[in-house]
Amino acid sequence: MRLLSVFVVFLGAVAYATSLDRAKSYILTLEEDQEAWKGKLDDLKSLVKQTGGKITHEYSLVKGFSMEIPSSHSTDVLERLEKFAQKLKFKLNIEQDQEVHAMSGPNGPVH
């Protein structure tokens, strides 16, 4: 019985530690009028993957993608993406993904 209690506590500690490094979701888009944007986008996706991130969606109407980055090093990854863009002299936008409502009333979003 005591072994079972220790095991349950261990599992709880592992679950807690795992939840501390949740991934943050971001959307990355390139500015519209840029040459060779396809290659730049592929390079950015490779950089995200190399740093432990994951591409979750590739957009077709805008030049960009969404990604998940472990929160423990999201700041570092975002800085590397910005430096990469500056080095190649192109503009990108990175925003944290969040829920958006088109309309809201006095008591919150209208569904």
Image (cartoon, grey):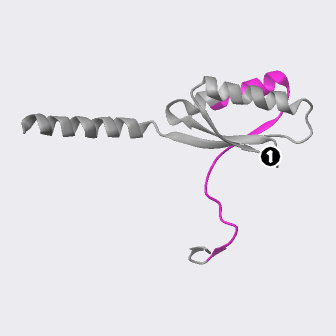
Work out whether residue 80 can be spotted: no
In this view, the residue in front, 56 or 102, is 56
Task: Determine crowd level at label 1: few under 14, some 14-19, many 20+ residues with C-alpha closer than 10 A.
Answer: few
Quarter holding the C terminus?
Answer: bottom right
Work out whether residue 107 can be spotted: yes
Residue 106 vertical position relative to residue 41 in the rendered view, above or below = below
Q: Which residue is mark 1?
A: 60
Image point 62% across, 28% down: which residue?
A: 77
On the image, the x and y values in percent for residue 22 come to 47, 40
In this view, the residue in front, 110 or 42, is 42
Q: Is residue 72 left or right of residue 108?
A: left
On the image, the x and y values in percent for residue 56 come to 63, 41
Occupied quadrant, residue 59: top right
On the image, the x and y values in percent for residue 23 come to 52, 39
Q: Is residue 17 left or right of residue 21?
A: left
**Which residue is at the far left?**
1
Q: Is residue 22 left or right of residue 64?
A: left
Inspect the image, locate mark 1, and give the three-letter code of the amino acid beneath it.
Ser
Quarter holding the N terminus?
Answer: top left
Q: Secondary structure at mark 1?
A: loop
Image point 81% across, 28% down: which residue?
A: 40
Residue 85 vertical position relative to residue 68 in the rendered view, above or below = above
Image point 33% across, 39% down: which residue?
A: 15
Residue 34 vertical position relative to residue 27 in the rendered view, above or below = above
Q: Which residues are magenta?
A: 78-105
Occupied quadrant, residue 91: top right
Q: Is residue 99 left or right of residue 90?
A: left
Image point 73% across, 29% down: which residue?
A: 44
